[in-house]
């Protein structure tokens, strides 16, 4: 693994954190690295990451979510069904609007257009798109742009509309948690990740630790979420990864792929606002929770924002898990059927 790109990314990320702190901007540990690494990538600075470290950071979020799933929280799950059954409709609306947009307006081939429109995980959609014969680089940049726009825009929406506190610590300090409980968190994160990979669970880095942490919490062995410092570290590496996704970008890619991604973000914003407004108007969920649950960003990024603002974690995570399940299991089948129909 080349060392220089990794050091460049770390240095750029830390510079972004310092700059955001100095300017008193929101979410310095997340938006700081996003911004500084994005700028470095656009300037042609070679950036890289360490995949095992990035994955380990996501396990922290899994433990954090699992630790919030107490019996009282689990008892609220049946009341979510009205908004959960709207999720497939939401994904269908995105596909109906997105595929023609990428195919006819932006000029991509069908596999690229289809997997660019699907609101799944960046890695999953790139892998599926590659197997279907799509343009891997275009898919990477389009989905990176989707995640970037959502992660940058949401904090300002949450602050402007609901006056959400973006400066609150996402947990308690490291010193406030006993060494035995910290050791248990590390064990849960590691074993949950390993077990989820063994059984082939999608989103193993988050869902494996989350499931195991929930079981340990329900059994009464875990009483705290991971400390603030650990969640800040997770924010840092997630932000650094988002910005570094633009590594090696060219002018032609900016002109075609990035602009196509930005245009699609406009489509996503319109659809998301429409569904969130309907959910809120019918009294199915609070506006902030509905927005975080239906925002088609990355699972890790939305989990971070929900933790920071103190939103209803169970509601938000349940909807994002359902979205990813539908997209990951249904996208390859739907793409095959649509492609056969076109033939």
Image (cartoon, grey):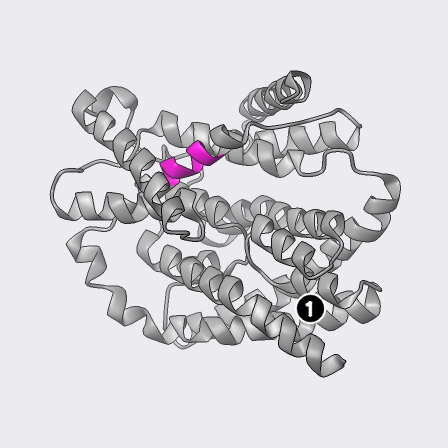
* Horizontal side of residue 336 vs 157, given as left or right: right
- Within-10-Å neighbours for mark 1: few <14, some 14–19, many 20+: many
Image quadrant occupied by the N terminus: top right
The residue nearer to you, when weighing 313 against 10, is 10
The image position of residue 229, as x and y in percent, is 37, 25
The image position of residue 305, as x and y in percent, is 45, 44
Image quadrant occupied by the C terminus: bottom right
The region drawn magenta spans 55-61
Question: Toward which corner of the image does residue 244 lie, by quadrant?
Answer: top right
Q: Residue at x 84, y 39 (%)?
A: 250
Disc count in the image? Answer: 1
Residue 163 seen from this side? yes
The image position of residue 291, as x and y in percent, is 48, 60
Q: Main secondary structure of the magenta part?
A: helix
Where is 170 relative to 98, above or below?
Answer: above
Question: Where does label 1 land, which residue?
Answer: 98
Q: In the displayed orientation, state which residue is furthest to the right.
A: 252
Residue 256 belongs to the span the image colors magenta: no
Q: Residue at x 56, y 46 (%)?
A: 151
* Horizontal side of residue 126 vs 188, given as left or right: right
Residue 59 belongs to the span the image colors magenta: yes
The residue nearer to you, when weighing 273 against 14, is 14
Q: SS at mark 1?
A: helix
């Amino acid at each position: 693994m080349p060392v220089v790109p990794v050091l460049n990314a770390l240095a750029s990320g830390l510079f972004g954190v310092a700059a955001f702190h100095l300017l008193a901007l929101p979410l310095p540990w997340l938006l700081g690295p996003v911004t500084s690494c994005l700028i470095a990538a656009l300037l042609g600075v070679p950036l890289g990451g360490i995949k095992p470290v990035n994955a380990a950071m996501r396990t922290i979020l899994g433990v954090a979510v699992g630790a919030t799933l107490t019996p009282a929280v689990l008892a609220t799950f049946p009341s979510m069904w009205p908004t959960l059954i709207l999720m497939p409709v939401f994904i269908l609306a995105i596909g109906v609007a997105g595929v023609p947009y990428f195919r006819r307006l932006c000029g991509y081939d069908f596999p690229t257009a289809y997997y660019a429109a699907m609101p799944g995980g960046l890695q999953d959609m790139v892998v599926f798109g590659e197997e279907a014969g799509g343009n891997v680089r275009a898919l990477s940049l389009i989905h990176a742009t989707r995640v970037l726009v959502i992660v940058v825009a949401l904090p300002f929406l949450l602050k402007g509309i609901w006056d959400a506190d973006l400066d609150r610590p996402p947990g308690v300090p490291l010193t406030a948690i006993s060494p035995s409980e910290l050791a248990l968190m590390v064990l849960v994160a590691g074993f949950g990740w390993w077990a989820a990979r063994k059984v082939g669970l999608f989103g193993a880095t988050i869902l494996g630790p989350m499931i195991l942490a929930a079981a340990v919490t329900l059994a009464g062995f875990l009483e705290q979420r991971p400390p603030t410092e650990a969640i800040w570290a997770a924010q840092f590496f997630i932000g650094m990864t988002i910005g570094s996704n633009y590594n090696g970008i060219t002018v032609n890619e900016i002109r075609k792929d990035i602009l196509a991604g930005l245009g699609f973000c406009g489509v996503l914003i319109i659809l998301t606002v429409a569904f969130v407004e309907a959910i809120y108007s019918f009294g199915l969920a609070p506006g902030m929770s509905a927005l975080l649950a239906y925002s088609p960003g990355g699972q890790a990024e939305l989990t971070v924002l929900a933790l920071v603002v103190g939103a209803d974690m169970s509601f938000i995570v349940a909807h994002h898990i359902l979205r990813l399940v539908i997209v990951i299991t249904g996208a390859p089948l739907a793409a095959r059927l649509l492609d056969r129909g076109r033939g």
